[in-house]
Amino acid sequence: MTVTDPVATIGRVGRHWGWFLAFGILTVALGLSAVVWPAITLLAAAIVFGVQLIFAGIYRLVSAFASEDTSGATRVLFALLGILSLVVGLYAVRHVLLTIVALALLLGIFWIVNGVIEIFTAAQHREMRGRGWRVFMGILSTIAGLILLAIPGISLVALVVVVSVWLILFGLLEISFGLRLRSGRAASVRPGR
């Protein structure tokens, strides 16, 4: 078993602080734009989801016929997955409102799972900085997911507002984490350490 120096580890992770900061800024910007343009946000999300499935289907179909190291059964599975992805993607683009409802249900499930993982992570790491904040965000995520699944008739505009607030808070946490990594890295590379 190797023992690693915590200061050196923080220094290595801290080199990538800019990625966390950029991701946080982008997430906050997405949240703010969703607040300003809720209808366009819903429409764009549904269309992007459909287009992504279409491209995934094309990729699977090409890989089913182009890959030489796969067996015949694997090729058939890739082809079936590609066709399914194409059909669902085309349906999602054609029936945007149904896609939005389906995305709302998937988002509800994601929020519940994400919230439980955040709470579990905070419970396992008692020495974690910002542990209370992480528990709070986990509880908020779980409650939002449960509400979304329990009340399927929730207003889609209200959903966009909830998503927007979530994105803004998550983005702010990522920005804070990036800045903490930067300051931790600066402390780890100071002379005399």
Image: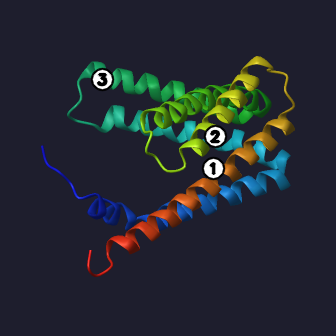
Residue nearest the viewer, comparing 186 with 156: 186
Q: Which residue is mark 2?
A: 137
Residue mark closest to the camera, 3 vs 2: 2
The amino acid at mark 2 is Met
The residue positioned 30% from the left and 63% from the top of the image is 7
| Quarter of the image with the N terminus in it | top left
The amino acid at mark 3 is Thr
Give how far apart the Cα atoms at labels 3 and 2 are.
Answer: 41 Å
Residue nearest the viewer, comparing 82 with 100: 100
The amino acid at mark 1 is Phe
| Badge 2 density bin: few <14, some 14–19, many ≥20, Cα 10 Å | many
Give how far apart the Cα atoms at labels 1 and 3 are.
Answer: 39 Å
Residue 111 place in picture, x, y as percent:
63, 32
Residue 16 place in picture, x, y as percent:
40, 64
Q: Which residue is mark 1?
A: 170
Give the side of residue 6 with respect to residue 87, left or right: left
In what element is the residue under mark 1?
helix
The residue positioned 82% from the left and 52% from the top of the image is 35
Q: Which mark is residue 74?
A: 3
* Total numbered badges shown on the rendered structure: 3
Residue nearest the viewer, comparing 76 with 169: 169
Residue mark closest to the camera, 1 vs 3: 1
Query: Which mark sits nearer the N-terminus, 1 or 3?
Result: 3
The residue positioned 29% from the left and 18% from the top of the image is 73
In what element is the residue under mark 2?
helix
Q: Which mark is residue 96?
A: none
Asked whether disc 1 touches disc 2, contact meaning CB atoms under 8 Å apart, the reply is yes
